[in-house]
Amino acid sequence: MSTKTRFGDFSISPGEVKLTPAQVRTDLLSGLTVALALVPEAVAFAFVAGVHPLVGLYAAFMVGLITAVFGGRPGMISGATGALAVVMVALVAQHGVEYLFATVVLMGLLQIFAGVMQWGKFIRLVPHPVMLGFVNGLAIVIFLAQLTQFKVPGTVEAAGHGAGGGEWLSGVALVMMLGLVGLTMLITWLAPRVTRLIPAPLAGIGIVAAIVIGFGLDVPRVGDLASIEGGLPTFHIPSVPLNWETFEIILPYAVILAAIGLIESLLTLNLVGDLTKQRGGASQECIAQGLANTATGFFGGMGGCAMIGQSMINVKSGGRTRIAGISAALFLLAFILIGSSVIELIPLAALVGVMFMVVIGTFAWNSFKILRKVPLMDAFVIILVTVVTVMEDLAVAVVVGVIVSALAYAWNNARRIHAKSYVTPEGARVYQVQGPLFFGSASGFIEMFDLESDPSEVIVDFADSRVVDQSALQAIEAVAAKYEELGKRVQLRHLTRDCHRLLTTAGHLMVDSDDDPDYEIATDYGVRTGILDGH
């Protein structure tokens, strides 16, 4: 039995999956697997942002825990992410880590505001081609991020920045690394065919780690990145001046981080929902992300958002309830407090192998077939979003994809405007406008009329059209003015109530609002130099 409370779009639900002992065990093991995969990611992203590894680990713990409890969909995993880290590095380099903490607090408050205003619902405007490009681009980004583990971890900076330093493995070390990665992938693929008692990624990590530790193989391990040992995160107010200058410094970064975090989280929300067949709330997720980041900023964390890679690990491992996300955060905290010496022995190859399997499972391979079947513009958007995600970041890619899709939609609708015309027995020319009249079709609308040849009485019928915006009003006025110059009279017919409101509000045309009460249409309104006369 499930209970649900609701505040607007905010809901708290135990989830649609029944909590049986078997499901709880699966969620706990899945949480352990996710926690193991979170460690190198959090450390690496902390280095990217230019902060101490514990700043990334604390963010992974706190953001993961709070969003697991209050998030919009069970099964999602949140933590420190590279998409946010690349924005933070400039702030940290110029102003220091305390300004980062203040920025994360403001970022969280902005996300809470977005959730309260229910702006999360606008994620519905993201077209399916953009979603495909997002998934493919992020899969490539996850793959490229793992390549940094194939470098000699001579310094923690080199391990964190990847291409920014460190030499590539070679010879026996490279062969051994590749062999262990391949073995992990093979075990992960075979494990579900043998038993489902243990999540396949956890089996891969455990077996490969046992082989490396048992035989004392000299391969890169988690401890080579940095020590993850630490204490409990402690509350402290960011040490920054509380003045307008500080606000001017942190606001631009906070807005960008809040937008990136929400876009990635909401897209991951939809993706996880498609996989688990569970419902969730976009506004609830916005509020949960905001609460998590606000708290994290006060506890020395770098902030975060949903992580598609770790979310896929959780889903593929059978994690379906909030217990999985909560346990992942608590296991991560346990690693920091008491288990660092053990976790640091785990070979990076095992974690890389698991992430490579995530890449294979995340990438939409059917998109290669789709590209040949969908309209050319949709195929272009898929490729565009994929490329921009890899070259720039997720937020830019999604915005670019939505803009291109919207422009393509507007262009297609602009081409739909046309009119059928005929002459009435009384000698009036009737234009039956078909298609939406808006900024994209306004020019085409004006060009439809044969001003010189038309008779003195012209009727424009909008029964099959719709006046949408200010550009449409200007187009109607322009046509009326041109006919007026030629001494001809124009009548407008079948304007809907919506059109009336637009015309009246704009103040350009005076409208008699005595509409037909049954059919909600206005009939026979004449236009003379911008004034509609009842007719």
Image: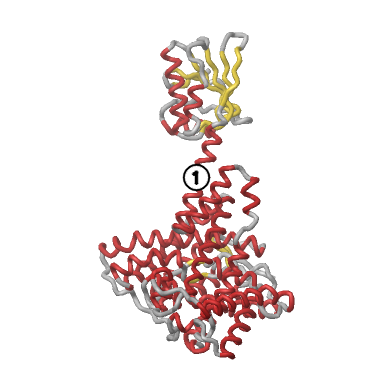
Q: Quadrant of residue 396?
A: bottom left
In this figure, which residue is indicated by the disc labeled 1?
Answer: 404
How far from the left and from the top, in percent, is residue 347?
54, 82
Residue name at image x 70 percent, y 75 percent: 190
How far from the left and from the top, in percent, is residue 196?
71, 77
* 73 left or right, relative to 333: right
Residue name at image x 49 percent, y 57 percent: 389
- Measured along the vertical axis of the image, is residue 282 above or below residue 424? below
Q: Amino acid at mark 1?
A: Val
How far from the left and from the top, in percent, is residue 350?
57, 78
Q: Nearer the viewer, residue 86 or 11?
A: 86
- Measured along the vertical axis of the image, is residue 417 above or below residue 239? above
Colour scheme in use: secondary structure
Residue name at image x 52 percent, y 12 percent: 454
How far from the left and from the top, in percent, is residue 407?
50, 41
Other residues around mark 1 within 10 Å, as few (<14) / some (14–19) / many (≥20): some
Residue at the right extreme of this rendering: 194
- Is residue 271 at least partly visible in the picture? yes
Circle 1 SS class: helix
- Is residue 334 at least partly visible in the picture? no
- Measured along the vertical axis of the image, is residue 386 above or below residue 92? above
Q: Quadrant of residue 225?
A: bottom left
Q: Nearer the viewer, residue 24 or 418?
A: 418
Residue at the front extreme of this rendering: 171
